[in-house]
Amino acid sequence: MITEIRIYKLKNGRAGEFGKLFTEQSLPMLRRWKVNVVDYGFSLIDPDSFYLVRGYDNTDQRKQSQDAFYGSEEWIKGPEQAIMDCIESYNTAVVDNNVLRIQKNEQACL
């Protein structure tokens, strides 16, 4: 299992619009496409930052899922342009869940 953590830096003043688009359009689509959305929301320290955490079996499954979702007519003709218009930039990290568990166990032993 792997976890993808994506952090969006939103354009100034667009957080409200982005939040509405995400919860009303993008999130229901992700669920229809059976994407495992683990968590999402706004940063506690930066109102113009939004995070999205998704889980996948492996990097191949992640690529196939995202290629299908972001290449779909539903996304392209749907909320893509409005969502992208709210985003200044984004960064993505993908981590191996087994590594996270090992590190957590090592810290518990200290």
Image (tube, rainbow, N blue to C red):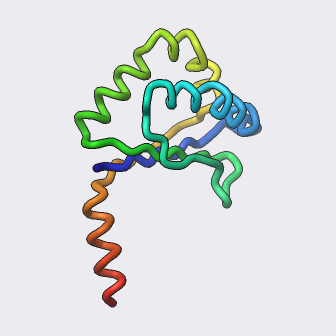
Q: Please provide percent x and percent y for residue 67.
A: 34, 23
Q: Please provide percent x and percent y for residue 38.
A: 48, 48
Give the residue drawn at x 55%, y 42%: 8
**Above-or-below relation of 18 to 44:** above
Would you say 98 lies left or right of 46 here? left
Find residue 96 and report its image quarter: bottom left
Give the residue drawn at x 67%, y 36%: 11
Give the residue drawn at x 58%, y 28%: 28
**Above-or-below relation of 105 to 85:** below
Q: Nearer the viewer, residue 41 or 33?
A: 33
Would you say 36 lies left or right of 18 here? left
Find residue 101 and report its image quarter: bottom left
Count the marks: 0
Q: Nearer the viewer, residue 99 or 17?
A: 99
Q: Please provide percent x and percent y for residue 23.
A: 66, 34
Give the residue drawn at x 35%, y 74%: 104
Q: Please provide percent x and percent y for residue 12.
A: 72, 39
